[in-house]
Image (tube, rainbow, N blue to C red):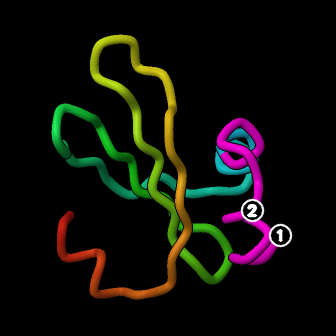
Amino acid sequence: MNLSDFNKATPDECTAWLQEQGTYLADRNYQGSKVCLYHIENFYAEVYHRSWDNQVYFVKGFKNQNLLKFY
């Protein structure tokens, strides 16, 4: 899966792929959510979890390493 395919997939598809292929790197808090950072092949991915029920509501992949400064 490349970055474009990843960003077109559903959050459930992305999280399944991250569990199988991704490497967890870190997490942070963002506006009441927990955001987990992963590395996959040649890009990074963030998974946003709602704080009150820990459900994934948003997933995005990126290559811009400047976005890593938030971790």
Disc marking residue 8? 2
Q: Amino acid at mark 2?
A: Lys
Residue of label 1 = 1
**Mark 2 or mark 1: which comes first in sequence?**
1
Q: Main secondary structure of the magenta part?
A: helix
Residue 16: image quadrant is top right
Residue 57 % position (x, y)? 50, 34
What's the CA distance linking mark 2 and mark 1?
11 Å
Looking at the image, residue 45 sits to the left or right of residue 26; the answer is: right
- CA neighbours of label 2 inside 10 A, class few (<14), some (14 to 19), many (20+): few
Quadrant where the C terminus lies? bottom left
Q: Residue at x 67, y 65 (%)?
A: 7
Disc marking residue 62? none
Q: Residue at x 36, y 86 (%)?
A: 65
Q: Amino acid at mark 1?
A: Met
Q: Is residue 44 magenta?
A: no
Q: Residue at x 69, y 76 (%)?
A: 3
Q: Which residues are magenta?
A: 1-14
